[in-house]
Amino acid sequence: MSILALTSDTLIGTAAAGNIEYNGQFFGTDSNNSRAQMQRITSGTAVASTSGTSIDFTSLPAWCKKITVMFSGVSSAGSSDLLIQLGDAGGIENTGYSSSYTQTTTTGSSTSGLILAAATSSDLWYGSVIITSFGSNTWTSIGNLTNTGAVRISAGIKATSDTLDRIRITVPSSTFDAGSINIMYEG
């Protein structure tokens, strides 16, 4: 790992235009000429959710502290919980979650992933889930998904065994058959 050392903490005159980027992190000045470290928002590449039981997004950087998972018309071929599972260098973890969702009188919970909804073949899901670091490899989530006027609100928590570097979106007892999924992450 390389380190960027700034040799002075005193501004001399007007701050230079632009920012310094190093190893995915930005350093610069704000309108008050205060130095700051800023993180970029990085967008993944949308993946078609038209087959298979899961979609993985890997190689998340260690400095990542917030992940937004976005759903556009995602559907499964049958009935299955729609889950997000977290992972590290040891692989995807499918135990130790505490999560639930609600929609009016419909509720559900899961210990095998961050549950978003109980999906059926007629559902097309749109919306997003935000996963944030609580520290010490613990992650919390909150999400809002809609399908044909119904809104599902979800929340959950999971402590990973090591530094998070991947997530999986899955319908474990079905297969995806429509839509696309993408992520954004930031420090």
Image: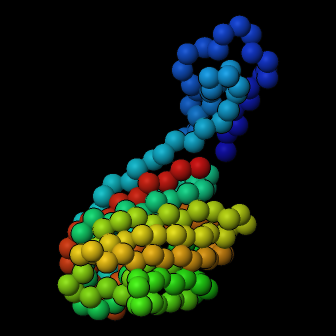
Q: Quadrant of residue 79?
A: bottom left
Q: Position of residue 81 (x, y in %)?
A: 38, 87
Q: Is residue 108 left or right of residue 137?
A: left
- Looking at the image, how many numbered discs can be counted on the residues? 0
Does residue 71 appear left or right of residue 24 in this picture? left
- The answer to whether 157 is drawn above or below residue 109 in the figure is above
Farthest residue toward the top?
13
Can you say whether 69 is above or below 111 in the image?
above
At 32% across and 82% down in the image, what residue appears? 53
What is the basis of the colouring in this image?
Answer: rainbow
> Residue at point 64% right, 14% down?
15
Looking at the image, which residue is at 48% across and 77% down?
A: 154
Specify whether 43 is left or right of 26: left
Foreground residue, 158 or 147? 147
Residue 97 coordinates in the image, percent (x, y):
58, 83
Which is nearer the eye, 74 or 164?
Answer: 74
Q: Provide residue 66's location: percent of width, then percent of height.
A: 55, 57
Can residue 162 be seen in the rendering of this structure? no
User: Considering only vertical position in the picture, is 52 above or below 3?
Assistant: below
- The residue under the point 50% across, 59% down is 67
Which image quarter holds the N terminus?
A: top right
Report whether residue 179 is seen: yes
Q: Quadrant of residue 135?
A: bottom right
Q: Position of residue 138 (x, y in %)?
A: 66, 70
Q: In the depicted view, which residue is nearer to us: 136 or 101?
A: 101
